[in-house]
Image (tube, rainbow, N blue to C red):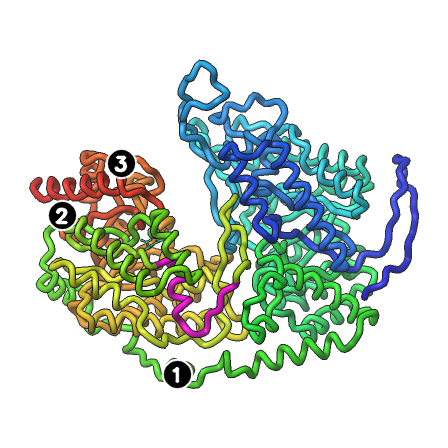
Amino acid sequence: MIHKTLWIVYIETGDSCLVAMSDIYTHNLGYPRIGQQRELKKATEAYWHGRLTREDLEATGRRLRQQNWATQQAAGMDLIPCNDFTFYDQTLDFSCLIGNVPPRFGWKGEEMDLDTLFLMARGSRGEAHDACDHGCSHQPVFACEMTKWFDTNYHYIVPEFRANTQFKLVGDKVFREFEEAKALGYRSKPVLPGPVTYLSLGKVQDSTNPDFDRFSLLDGLLDVYEQILQRLQRLGAEWVQIDEPIFGLDLSEAQRDAVLVAWQRLAQAAPGLKILVTSYFSELRENLPLFLSLPAQAVHFDAVRGVGELDALLAGFPSDKILSLGVVDGRNIWKNDFSASLKILAEAQAVVGSERLWVAPSCSLQHSPITLVNEPSLDTELRGWMSFADEKLEEVATLSGLLRGTADQSLLWGNQQSLQARRESSRIHRVEVKTRLAGVHASDYDRVSPFAQRQPLQRKKLKLPEFPTTTIGSFPQTAEVRAMRARWKKGELSTEAYEVFLQHEIQHCVSFQDEIGIDMPVHGEFERNDMVEYFGEQLDGFVFTQNGWVQSYGSRYVKPPIIFGDVSRPVPMTVRWSQYAQSLTPRPMKGMLTGPVTILQWSFVRDDQPRSETTRQIALAIRDEVLDLETAGIAAIQIDEPAIREGLPLRHSDWATYLDWAVNAFRLCASGVRDDTQIHTHMCYSEFNDIIESIAAMDADVITIETSRSNMELLEAFVDFKYPNEIGPGVYDIHSPRVPGVEEMVALMHKAEAVIPRAQLWINPDCGLKTRGWVEVKSSLLHMVEAARQLRADK
Ligand code: GLN
Ligand code: ZN
């Protein structure tokens, strides 16, 4: 138990309210808002579908906030965040707070409401809605873009900026939440994105002023920040947390200038309000002096990712600031190493003193699952090594207590024993995996012959026409497919019955492709819940939670696998399905695997060895599968790597190292096959300009990419590079139920053919079809095959 000391009561000048203050030792930067039972998802989706009233939705939000504050308080946090809750995304909340609503949403510029926020997040399909009694059909309005929040798997709604963008304080969410917490007796600090981070992460969307400088909006933005801070001060806020994670990236001169201007004004806006500025996810490197010079009362530093620059931080740490050290990793699920953290904290304490040192998680806990309490079936040994958000808060409190001598030393002892057990566990360390990895030879990364020699051999074997047609792998995961899998998982359906069902689905899928004339069919991936989970469940070294959900965006949550130990593949994972599918058709069936980098990126990864090492282990497991597929007579094998790009480090100077091991991992899993076996890879939502060399170095015989939405723009990188291997630029936008016409696809391929030799081109959709319905898929693929016929005829 941490005991609270030193209650000081002081009177704020210029304000009559009395504020009780105690010392702050611990705080949290943000807490998961989704609810232990995914209450937020259920409520927002019910509201969108008209099954829940606005009042009930708001009530769910209030309940979640109250629970979250109570949990954090009970865990011993001296200062807890507010305004970290959101019905969709906190960056979008901020856009709404300051009235930054793009004109296409028709917002009148007055009060902000939740429906405008949801419209920005989700767009509208343009159907007539109830509010229109004359039954008119509204124009569809496209949603704001969303993109990944730094190197997390969380996606934020991208703010848009125009030359005539004007900011105005129109929302009140942050004030309401602060008052709500205060009324419940919580000492909370409102969380806001920093002005430079907000401007930097948005995009300029102004066709009439394409060269307009977003930082010209800074002054107007700061006017609104001033109003926000002043109002928070009036409401009795003592601290505000301003997040500037942009400090973890390469900063331009314009950004640095903006920092200076912005922070001077923020510091002066509300003299009675203290500011905690945070950075996280990265080292600060050359940005460290600028960060430390910010005129804020407290500075938060990610001591997990930034551990290597702790000495530099302490050496230059200003004598008048509080240092918040994020020693508990908010980005992973492993138990904290108390002795390592205490060493860091003690070093800091020696420099800044106890009163100026706060203990915290490294970043917001929104990136962690909520609690281990809801994992009763998790293997107890493995569970003992883990820590989710609630456990992390306990760790923060315990570390602070141990540091200050108020916590029981046995907690340190217990922690060390647990870590020791993990380090030595035979569950993690598998001699045969390590030996095999050590025996990997340089030649294992190379195909037998270069592409130019492989291509004719593959042509001879596969006998494909010009513009071969294929798909990316999955076919519609209908309600029936999902229901059957759920019943099988619950034990309500026997394995035998489930497999018969899967065979039927495959039969139907293959015969459809045969009928319409898809040149390289697939089996349809009906047996897969998810492209990573399916493999993780069959590989050794992975474990799965029951309730370890983390928000990906809006109401979409993911439950990442946990890679805890050395990875290996006990038995083939996909061979029987591919082989069965191949038995149904004379055409070459494409085998379908997920690549090592994507498996890594979408999992919680062990922290006791470099990520590159874990990836190499996965690569060897996939290599075994590739070879087994080849032996089973599968002549083309696709290894999906959609997450290669998103794995890029935050700093440019770290890219080369990452790309090197990521590309090598792919080559390791793909290179064991004969020359006449065709290796495909697939990447979606990716830009290629700055990584094209690495994409080419993967040396896949065929790459399929998502290009239809960008009107083939994404192909340019391949053209400029003179990409030598074959390529399938997507002609069918699978994000939409719309059926593309034949002419449209032909036109897209004409664009491609103008810049890439036709002998190199394939025709395929942008990505898998699992979220689509059969009716649209049938028409769209029929059109795609017809487009290929016309292109072939048109020499
Ligand atoms: N093969 C996978 C599918 O078709 C690929 C999915 C992806 O790229 N995200 O669903
Ligand atoms: Zn894809």
Give coordinates of residue 617: x percent, y percent. 40, 74
Q: Disc 1 designates what residue?
A: 438
What is the secondary structure assignment of the residue under circle 2? helix
- Binning the other alpha carbons within 10 Å of mark 3 as few (below 14), some (14 to 19) or many (20 upward) gives some
Which contiguous range is marked in magenta?
528-545
Quick check: is 532 in the magenta stretch?
yes
Which mark is in front, 2 or 1? Answer: 2
Q: Disc 2 designates what residue?
A: 515
User: Is 172 on the left or on the right of 489, as rendered?
Assistant: right
Task: Give the mark count.
Answer: 3
**Height in image: 724 above or below 745?**
below
At 92% across and 48% down in the image, what residue appears? 9
What is the secondary structure assignment of the residue under circle 1? helix
Residue 739 bears which disc, if any?
3
* Amino acid carrying mark 2 in the image: Glu
- Binning the other alpha carbons within 10 Å of mark 1 as few (below 14), some (14 to 19) or many (20 upward) gives few
User: Is 209 on the left or on the right of 737, as rendered?
Assistant: right
**Height in image: 156 above or below 549?**
above
Quick check: is 269 in the magenta stretch?
no
Residue 445, located in which quarter of the rendered image? bottom left
Image quarter hosting the N terminus: bottom right
